[in-house]
Image: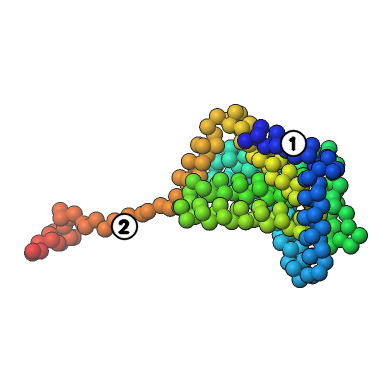
């Protein structure tokens, strides 16, 4: 997965570097149309800005950090390291790609939102896909069929929403978001493969450990043990004498 996503990322980067190509025209048309709509509908723009703030990279990294702490408390150290590595490697890879490619963000004379630094690949889209995929993967083995559908749907909706808000606010192009998703696939595949090489079978063993420790326990109620029939009272009489 990491190799395939890296190849597609490289191809997308070459296509976006062609000023007169079809991808550049699609980026420009999409961003201009959404920006015009955002300028005319202030309430809609405010709600999109709120969703954009809630789904920012900081929020996603905090969620992964909390997941890593929870896994560490359960003794799943390899899985905890996996979650922490996804957050750190994802941030480092995204920033390195942005400053290396140095593609400027869309520019407007009347912007509805501001964002600093290069915009390719989208760090928000990258962080959202990494975090939502990791959380869904942690829940998947322990969820019912309905729970898996709910987790997959929620993760897909969150990733799509974060990607859309950046385009709607004019801080990213569609190709920025697509590059962020491909970058996330590279990080997910690479981090998982490296950990599996360093600790063969460690992720699976930790998954079983988490499943065992979070599985609900069923306690059986035992009836109280009756006193022995050979016990006598202080007067020397059998307390069970005369019972039917």
Q: Is residue 185 left or right of residue 36?
A: left
Q: Quadrant of residue 237?
A: bottom left
| Disc 1: which residue | 11
Cα–Cα span, label 1 and label 2? 64 Å
Q: Is residue 174 visible?
A: yes
Observer-nearest residue: 141 or 159?
159
Q: Quadrant of residue 99?
A: top right
Seen as rendered, the residue at the extreme right is 109
Look at the numbered disc 1 and give the secondary structure of its residue. helix
Look at the numbered disc 2 and give the secondary structure of its residue. loop
Image vertical order of residue 84 relative to residue 145, above or below: above
Viewport quadrant of the C terminus: bottom left
Residue for point 16% across, 57% down: 232
Observer-nearest residue: 2 or 8?
8
Residue for point 89% across, 62% down: 110
Residue 124 rendering spot, x and y as whole percentages: 73, 51
| Disc 2: which residue | 221
Observer-nearest residue: 12 or 1?
12
Badge 1: how crowded within 10 Å, few (<14), some, or many (20+)?
A: few
Observer-nearest residue: 148 or 45?
45
Which mark is first along the chain, 2 or 1? Answer: 1
Q: Is residue 98 visible?
A: no
Q: Is residue 180 left or right of residue 225?
A: right
Residue 146 rendering spot, x and y as whole percentages: 47, 56
Q: Nearer the viewer, mark 1 or mark 2?
A: 1
Residue 77 rendering spot, x and y as whole percentages: 58, 39
Q: Is residue 209 left or right of residue 26?
A: left
Image vertical order of residue 89 relative to residue 52, above or below: above
Residue for point 48% across, 49% down: 142
């Amino acid at each position: 997965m990491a190799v395939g996503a890296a190849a597609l990322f490289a191809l997308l980067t070459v296509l976006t570097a062609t000023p007169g190509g079809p991808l550049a025209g699609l980026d420009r048309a999409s961003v201009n149309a959404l920006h015009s709509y955002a300028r005319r509908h202030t309430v809609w723009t405010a709600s999109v800005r709120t969703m954009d703030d809630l789904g920012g990279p900081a929020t996603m990294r905090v969620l992964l950090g909390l997941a890593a702490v929870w896994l560490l408390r359960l003794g799943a150290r390899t899985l905890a390291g996996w979650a922490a590595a996804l957050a750190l490697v994802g941030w480092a890879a995204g920033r390195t790609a942005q400053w290396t490619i140095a593609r400027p963000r869309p520019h407007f004379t009347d912007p509805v939102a501001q964002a600093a630094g290069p915009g390719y690949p989208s760090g928000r889209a990258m962080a959202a896909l990494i975090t939502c995929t990791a959380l869904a993967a942690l829940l998947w083995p322990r969820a019912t069929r309905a729970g898996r559908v709910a987790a997959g749907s929620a993760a897909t909706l969150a990733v799509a929403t974060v990607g859309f808000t950046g385009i709607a606010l004019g801080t990213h192009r569609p190709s920025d978001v697509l590059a962020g998703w491909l970058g996330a696939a590279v990080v997910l595949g690479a981090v998982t493969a490296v950990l599996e090489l360093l600790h063969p079978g460690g992720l699976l063993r930790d998954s079983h450990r988490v499943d065992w420790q979070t599985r609900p326990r069923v306690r059986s109620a035992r009836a109280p043990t009756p006193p022995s029939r050979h016990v006598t009272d202080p007067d020397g009489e059998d307390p069970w004498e005369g019972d039917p």
